[in-house]
Amino acid sequence: MTWLHRTTQGVLAEVERAKDAGCFPFFRPFENVGPHVGIGRERYVNFTSNDYLGLSQHADVKHAAIRGVEAYGTGLGSSRLQATSVRHEELEQRLARWLQVEACAIFPSGYQALVGTLQAFLDDETLVALDNQSHASVLDGLYLAKGQHPDLEERYFRHNSVKGLRRVLATTERANRLVVVEGLYGADGDLAPLDDMVKLCREFDAPLLVDDAHGIGAIGPGGRGAAEQYGVHGDVDLLVGTFSKVFGGVGGFLAGDADLVSFVKLTARSFVFSASLPVGQVESALAALDIVEQDDSRRQRLEANGDYFRAGLQSLDFSTGNSTTHICPIMIGDEHLAMQFGARLFDEANVIMLPFIYPGVPLGEARLRCNVTAAHERADLDHALQALARIGSELGIIGAKQGSA
Ligand SMILES: Cc1ncc(COP(=O)(O)O)c(C=O)c1O
């Protein structure tokens, strides 16, 4: 046994304990994908997917992926520097046009888009101001930059606090400042106050990076995300999105001014040193973009389902935190209770809602992650609400109140 094996012991012992208690919720092997999934012989209603519009199962999106594979094969054999297809360029131009920016760069994932963009711009002269609930992709970009530039100044402000952001910007001596926020927060389902943040960024001459992995395609009058919802999508300097949620596939992108995007394409390590997104994924993203641009019926259904479910949860006295969207966390607090709740929903009601615990969320803020999609039927939502009411009250998470919504 080497020290490598000894390193694994703490984590693996915890996993064994959770398995023994029947509440290890990860790596359940699905037989299919969608709002209803098969695991072994059972069928479950799934609330863990970020496929918010259900496009991963759309016939046009699937056929586009197949066409891409038939035309180009399964991979391009190199990074974008040596392996850019005409279809990559088409997707970058189409996204830029839709988002009303000059240019766009496609990455193999949204994670890589964030890590690479931050690493490319942050240096020893810079202050980066971050919301204290920043996603791991943002934090890892910061860690990578910090490894190369130890004098980089990083400052966190309280989640969504415009006052806190002002304090950070007003008290730094650095001339180069970058503000980084999410548009729609994936853990809380709330929106950054981008209208006020844009004003503040202007006042302090600080460019704004918005990671809107969860919002692009899902919210805003034209589906362009949180910034469009606030009427400020022309004021975001660097916009990062993903194909792994609304677009139903995999891959990510950076959108912004042409010079900024060109610079990132030449200097972001996660772009330069990682393989080009396969054309099957490029084609499926193009087909998903057609739907996102031309048909807002799925977005309307997403909003209606989110509103219905959140109202149902609140009428049962569950706390949904600050959520105003289809991402409806069920706030529990205690980690063990969240794990138990998730396990009982799975075992007794065939409902999948994953416990979201530290370090995914701050300690003491454990919750069930509950994503409503446009593909859920009202019957799915009612079934889940009834199960939540019964098990939630048996666990003492809500009062005696019970029943359907
Ligand atoms: C807020 C946020 N940003 C970025 C990402 C990374 O996206 P991708 O799945 O494309 O790597 C995620 C994915 O979970 C996310 O939730």
Image (cartoon, rainbow, N blue to C red):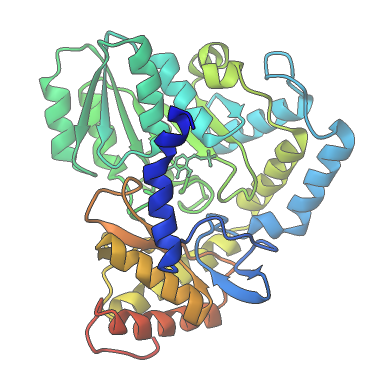
Kindly tell me whether residue 359 is visible in this rendering: yes
Q: Image check: 265 left or right of 335?
A: right
Q: Is residue 87 above or below residue 51?
A: above
Furthest-right residue in this view: 70
Instruction: Estimate the x, y position of residue 353 in percent, counting from the top left.
Output: 45, 66
- Which quadrant, please, contains the C terminus? bottom left
Question: In the image shown, does 351 or 112 lie closer to the viewer?
Answer: 351
The residue lying at 46 percent from left, 48 percent from top is 214
Q: Image check: 193 left or right of 97?
A: left
The residue lying at 25 percent from left, 56 percent from top is 365
Q: Picture quarter containing residue 195?
A: top left
Question: In the image shown, does 85 or 137 lie closer to the viewer?
Answer: 137
Q: Is residue 279 above or below residue 42?
A: above
Q: Picture quarter containing residue 120?
A: top left
The residue lying at 73 percent from left, 14 percent from top is 82
Instruction: Estimate the x, y position of residue 377 in percent, counting from the top left.
Output: 57, 76
Kindly tell me whether residue 227 is visible in this rendering: no
Question: In the image shown, does 200 or 72 lie closer to the viewer?
Answer: 72
The residue lying at 54 percent from left, 22 percent from top is 270
